[in-house]
Image (cartoon, helix red, strand yellow):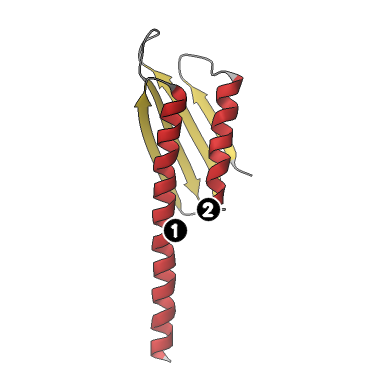
Amino acid sequence: MIKINITSRHFKAHETLQEYIKAEIENLSKYNEEIIYADVILSFEKAVNSIKHCEILIKISDKNFTAKESSDDFTKSIDKAVNKIETQILKYKDKNKAEKYNSKKEIKKTI
């Protein structure tokens, strides 16, 4: 279970928006099971016709991932930020696989 903290600056986020964020963050667990917590920060510039900002901070056991996105709608900003986090997690996962594979090769060579 991922601990999700949603912060909305200068406004109160609707329940539907909060549920949408939780669903998107929970979907990230299929890429990495070790996600400890997620911080989501929502803000906007002006009250009318403003640009909506979304910042997501993800903590995995030994690594932090961050993504910031802006658009005219919160759901678009959230989707873009989640896609960035997905990319970062997949790169991290591939890098760790490569390191584990190379370390196993080195052990075999020494024997």
For the C terminus, the quadrant is bottom left
Amino acid type, residue under disc 2 in the picture = Asn
Residue in the picture at 54% in, 39% down: 25
Spot occupied by residue 45 in the image (x, y as percentages of width and height): 35, 15
Q: Residues within 10 Å of mark 1 (few under 14, many from 20)?
A: some
Q: Nearer the viewer, residue 38 or 51?
A: 51
Side (left or right) of 84 relative to 12:
left
SS state under label 1: helix
Instruction: Classify residue 37 as left or right of residue 1.
Output: left
| Quadrant of the rendered image containing residue 22 | top right
- Helix, strand or loop at mark 2: loop
Q: In this view, does 10 lie above or below 6?
A: above
Q: What residue is shown with label 2? A: 32
Residue visible at 38% across and 7% down? 48
How many numbered badges does the structure rendering display? 2
Q: Which residue is depicted at the point 55% across and 23% down? A: 17
Which of the two discs, 2 and 1, labels the residue nearer the N terminus? 2
- Asked which quadrant contains residue 51, the reply is top left
Q: How far apart are marks 2 and 1 (CA)?
A: 8 Å
Say which quadrant the N terminus sits in. Answer: top right
| Residue position marked by numbered label 1 in the rendering | 93
- In this rendered view, identify the residue nearer to me: 6 or 75: 75
The reply to whether callout 2 and callout 1 are in contact (CB within 8 Å) is yes
- Give how far across and how far down residue 85 sits, in percent: 42, 43
Indicate the amino acid at tag 1.
Lys
Residue 37 position (above or below residue 99): above
Left or right: 3 as drawn, with respect to 53: right
